[in-house]
């Protein structure tokens, strides 16, 4: 099975805008093919919003962007009913969450109340406004960016919110050659303005179905269960992975296998996507002295491959 030619075209287009970050770009595409929401965490100025914009453009999805701030209210996200004299009735005005992709910029600058308004949208693909439940568009993705917790004016995302994100990625600084290309090249915003969609929503639905059909053999699931058991042993993390997180790993690994041109999941696929898929859900034991992603990598090295 070959990863679709449109996917190759999509990756090429994204890599012309986000230079020198092929693994991260590939992980972003895998996350959306797996049907998951994406959290991009990094210092300001390394291209988080640019990447989020480029993804929604290339996937051919209709998107809205919300700059999260401390005074952002839940109604600013989901919408509000306003009384219209002409109709003598309240009319619902949908908020920016009614888009196929919601770019939640600097999500951890909003108050916990506003963050929790996103929980229902992300999990149920619907929102309840003034007692009425309204379905969100299909597909519906949240691509959120956040700054590191130690920056001023940020609220840590609660565990329940973090758990709704399928993957958390960090872009990091570009290497010297990539930075030279950025300095010499066109303005990234102009490049995004002129980007053509590579996929249609129908293409995306077809590709997601293909990813779902990727085969996962019992030995691979056994390996994943060994890893999940290791997270619950108390040796590496304060608390272990939930079944929902384990299912997220399977979906990520299927997308990873598909992008590698295979119709089956290999143990390497699980190892390759595990840090990005579970790092944000885990707290290392206090004496580890490592971040959660480094701790996941150490646990991977200590767990034998099948």
Image: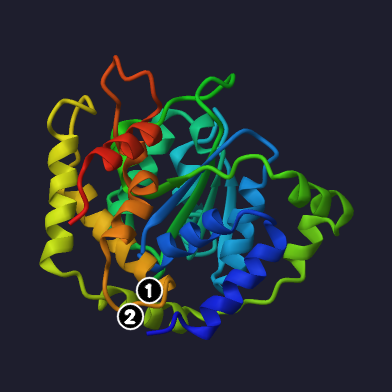
Sequence-wise, the earlier of marks 2 and 1 is 2
Residue 26, percent from left and from top: 51, 62
Question: Residues under labels 2 and 1: Cα distance?
Answer: 8 Å
Asked whether 36 or 240 is in front, the reply is: 240
Residue at left 62%, top 68%? 57
Image mark for residue 210: 2
- Place residue 147 in its image quadrant: top right
| Position of residue 52 measured from the top left corner of the image (x, y, whole percent) | 58, 55
At horizontal 14% and vertical 47% (from top left) the residue drawn is 226
**Callouts 2 and 1 close, C-beta under 8 Å:** yes
> Residue 182: horizontal and vertical position, in percent?
80, 52
Closest to the observer, 93 or 22: 22
Residue 89 visible (yes or no): no
Q: Quadrant of residue 9?
A: bottom right
Nearest the camera: 300 or 252?
300
Q: Is residue 45 above or below residue 237?
A: below
* Helix, strand or loop status at disc 1: helix
- Quadrant where the C terminus sits is bottom left
Side of 146 relative to 124 (left or right): right
Which residue was labeled with disc 1?
A: 258
Q: Please provide percent x and percent y for residue 251.
A: 28, 62
Label 2 crowding class (10 Å Cα cut-off): few <14, some 14-19, many 20+?
A: some
- How many C-alpha atoms fall within 10 Å of the one at disc 1: few (<14), some, or many (≥20)? many
Placement of 242 over or under 16, stated as above or below: above
Q: Residue at x 32, y 37 (%)?
A: 296
Element under label 2? helix
On screen, 170 above or below 19?
above
Question: Does residue 14 lie above or below 156 as drawn?
Answer: below
Q: Is residue 264 left or right of residue 86?
A: left
Report the quarter where the N terminus lies: bottom left
187 left or right of 148?
right
On residue 24, the disc is: none
């Amino acid at each position: 099975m070959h990863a679709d030619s449109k996917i190759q075209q999509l990756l090429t287009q994204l890599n012309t805008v986000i230079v020198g970050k092929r693994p991260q770009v590939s992980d972003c595409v895998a996350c959306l093919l797996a049907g998951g929401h994406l959290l991009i965490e990094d210092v300001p100025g390394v291209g988080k919003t640019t990447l989020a914009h480029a993804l929604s453009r290339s996937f051919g999805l209709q998107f809205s962007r919300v700059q999260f701030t401390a005074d952002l209210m839940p109604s600013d996200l989901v919408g509000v009913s306003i009384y219209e004299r002409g109709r003598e009735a309240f009319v619902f005005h949908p908020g920016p969450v009614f888009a196929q992709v919601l770019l939640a910029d600097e999500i951890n600058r909003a108050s916990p109340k506003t963050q929790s308004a996103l929980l229902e949208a992300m999990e149920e693909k619907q929102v309840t406004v003034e007692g009425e439940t309204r379905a969100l568009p299909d597909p519906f993705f949240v691509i959120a960016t956040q700054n590191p917790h130690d920056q001023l004016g940020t609220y840590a995302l609660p565990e329940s919110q973090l758990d709704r994100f399928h993957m958390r990625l960090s872009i990091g600084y570009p290497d010297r050659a990539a930075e030279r290309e950025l300095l010499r090249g066109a303005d990234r915003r102009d490049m995004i303005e002129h980007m053509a969609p590579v996929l249609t929503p129908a293409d995306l639905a077809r590709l997601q179905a293909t990813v779902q059909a990727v085969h996962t053999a019992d030995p691979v699931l056994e390996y994943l269960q060994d890893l999940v058991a290791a997270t619950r042993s108390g040796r590496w993390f304060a608390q272990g992975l939930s079944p929902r997180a384990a299912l997220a790993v399977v979906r990520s690994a299927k997308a990873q296998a598909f992008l590698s041109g295979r119709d089956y999941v290999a143990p390497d696929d699980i190892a390759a996507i595990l840090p990005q898929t579970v790092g944000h859900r885990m707290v290392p034991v206090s004496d580890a002295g490592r971040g959660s992603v480094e701790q996941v990598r150490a646990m991977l090295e200590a767990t034998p491959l099948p």
